């Protein structure tokens, strides 16, 4: 799917369940994403998520851009901005526990 440097298994599981639908090319489109007008909102959110950061495109990012994205990941997760609130309304299992947030930030802040 995507190649991120030294991503521990627990963080990969978090990305898979809470991030990949909007931040990779591996979106799993639910049934409601095919029914307008909801489909428009879902498609827009995925497009914006991929535009901001796309794990599937990670290797094409410059080292500087990767470092910035890693900072952004931790900040957004700690602030509760990600996963997005609209996404969590339907995907409750994507909500991150304090321990999961800590795991993501520990990985994102690890020396590279």
Image: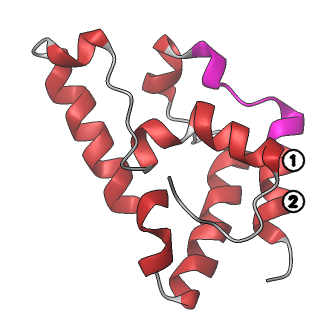
30 shown above or below 103: above
**x and y percentages locating residue 44 in the rendered image:** 22, 39
- Residue 64: image quadrant is bottom right
**x and y percentages locating residue 105 in the rendered image:** 80, 57
In this view of the protein, which residue sits in the foreground, 18 or 12?
12
Q: Pointer 1: what residue?
A: 102
- Residue 36: image quadrant is top left
**x and y percentages locating residue 68 in the rendered image:** 58, 77
For the magenta stretch, what is the residue range?
92-101
Give yes or no for contact between labels 2 and 1 (Cβ–Cβ under 8 Å): yes
Residue 5 located left or right of residue 31: right
34 shown above or below 5: above
64 shown above or below 53: below
Residue 86 located left or right of residue 40: right
Q: How is the image coloured?
A: secondary structure
Q: Secondary structure at mark 1?
A: helix
- Magenta highlight: main SS: helix
Q: Pointer 2: what residue?
A: 106
């Amino acid at each position: 799917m995507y190649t991120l440097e030294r991503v521990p298994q627990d963080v990969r599981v978090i990305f898979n369940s809470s991030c990949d639908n909007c931040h990779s090319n591996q979106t799993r489109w639910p049934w409601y994403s095919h029914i307008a007008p909801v489909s428009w909102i879902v498609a827009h959110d995925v497009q914006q998520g991929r535009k901001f950061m796309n794990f599937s495109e990670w290797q094409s990012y410059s080292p500087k851009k990767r470092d910035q994205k890693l900072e952004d990941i931790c900040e957004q997760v700690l602030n509760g901005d990600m996963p997005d609130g609209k996404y969590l309304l339907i995907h409750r299992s994507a909500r991150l526990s304090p321990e999961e947030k800590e795991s993501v930030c520990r990985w994102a802040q690890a020396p590279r």
